[in-house]
Amino acid sequence: MGTSLEVMCELLVGNLESGDRLEALIFSAIYLKWINTGQIPCFEDGGHPRPNRHAEISRLIFRELERIYCMKDTSLQEVLAIRKIHPCLPSFKAEFTASVPLTRIRDVAHWGDIPHDLKLQIKHTIQNKLHRNAGPEDLVATEAMLARITRNPEEYSEAFVEQFKIIHHELKDFSMLRNLTEQLESIKESFDDRSLSALTLFLECKERLDNLEESKDALDKSIDLLLKTAQSLNALREVIVKGLESSLRNDVPDAAIAMRQKWRLCEIGLEDYSFLLLSRFLNALEAVGGAQQLKENAESKNPEECTAIGNELLAWKEKGLSEKEGSEDGKAVWALRFKVTLDGSRRLTKEYSEALLQMFPQKVECYVISQYMSSPTVDRWAVVEQILCYLKGAPGDEDRCLWQVTAAGNNIKGVVLLQELPHLSHLGVRAGQEKVIFVTCEDDDKIADIQKLNGKCVRHNTTGNFPVKDL
């Protein structure tokens, strides 16, 4: 992952004109998302960058993103792309920027009372990979190992298991994969009394909501609790957003930047959680009769509970609920106003979704193509729309080649592997599943003839003689 972050840093930090910025941010968001979800695996490249290098680069990228975020000419689309990048950056807390970070795994790999084969497995599958090219797959490997050593409670010592749990927690922290509650707890120390009360109220509402049992009585209660949770979320998010309004100074300490990263992720996490609350609110509302039931029960509702819906409600909330609005039924008018606000909220979320769809899908498709062209396993290309590609095989690269063939979809029409390969290899089987012509060739003269066709339209007819002709 270190090399990936270096590429992102070179692309984003200090070299962007405003016209190129949005595209660079979108492609960065796509690339880091695929890294974080394991769609692009992190391989060792022979170097030895410790995780502190990842943390240092992450800090540089974060500073630049925050600088762009606070600029006056930054577009809403750029802000949206930046908000997709932030959760993919590793933590750069002091413990991760230390010269030798995450050393606990080394001690565990040499633990005295565990079997030798387990020591070797921890060393080769986690320790070495983590200290040479840390990536999201290290957390996956650690979770799998933790599941193994906790399967039989008395198989391994309590002290060993406890240390391994700490390692798992450290990797979650490094990868910024804590849940929302854990993230918020981590910034509690930086809050003043007023802000702390907003945080406490939200966490209490969230805990009550998480523990609410599914029943008819609980369903009625959940609507009130969902609204209170949404109110407390908005109040807390307002506190955090206000704290993030000012841009970073050049002389700000590293510890302050690390805390700002936590605040930013909490703010983004609260926004994500608000969508979950809205979804649960709509489901609960439908379960008790929908809009008609809301109208019938309007007289028992406190209008102040609806402040979470936004400023639109505040304009008429002050008047309170009356029996009559002119010649109209007051309850009916209240319900209609509430419906208008919900419709506006739905339009807003639809616009948000449409903005995402306009920004990312085309860039994702372009990135898939560019990924082939920049890959060390890809040699030459024939046509951009329908591609005949040449893969330079290398020991251990089959998984990467397999990913390329799978991800290409309809763009790859033929694959030529420049080495021998068993007919029933994973790569060969996957190429057959994708209906992609797949051949191997070790004849240097034939390969040289084919490479002369680079950039031209070709007809590929796979036979024993392997002809490829210029159209």
Image (cartoon, rainbow, N blue to C red):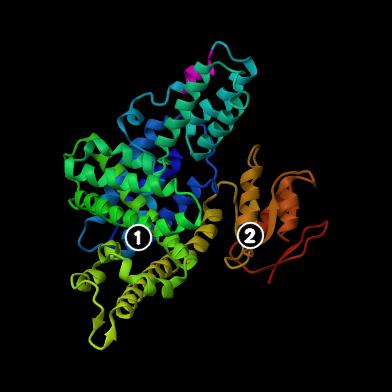
Q: Is residue 342 above or below residue 179?
A: below
Q: Position of residue 438 (x, y in %)?
A: 73, 55
Within the image, what quadrant is residue 451 found in? bottom right
Magenta span: 105-111
Q: Is residue 467 left or right of residue 238?
A: right
Within the image, what quadrant is residue 255 found in? top left
Q: Position of residue 172 (x, y in %)?
A: 44, 36
Q: Is residue 329 above or below residue 314?
A: below
Density class for disc 1 (Cα within 10 Å; few <14, some 14-19, many ≥20) is: some
Q: Position of residue 286 (x, y in %)?
A: 47, 68
Q: Is residue 301 left or right of residue 103?
A: left
Which residue bears the numbered disc 1?
80
Image mark for residue 452: 2
Q: Residue at x 41, y 47 (%)?
A: 88
In 3D space, how far apart are the residues under numbered discs 1 and 2 (Cα atoms)? 44 Å
Density class for disc 2 (Cα within 10 Å; few <14, some 14-19, many ≥20) is: few
In the current view of this chain or complex, which residue is farthest to the top?
112
What amino acid type is highlighted by mark number 2?
Answer: Lys
N-terminal label among 1 and 2? 1
Which element type, helix, strand or loop, lies under badge 1?
A: helix
* Tags 1 and 2 touching, CB below 8 Å: no
Q: Is residue 106 magenta?
A: yes
Q: Position of residue 445 (x, y in %)?
A: 72, 51
For the question of whether residue 21 can be seen, the reply is: no
Q: Is residue 462 above or below residue 324?
A: above
Q: Is residue 350 magenta?
A: no
**The C terminus - image quarter:** bottom right
Q: Residue at x 34, y 53 (%)?
A: 229
What amino acid type is highlighted by mark number 1?
Answer: Leu
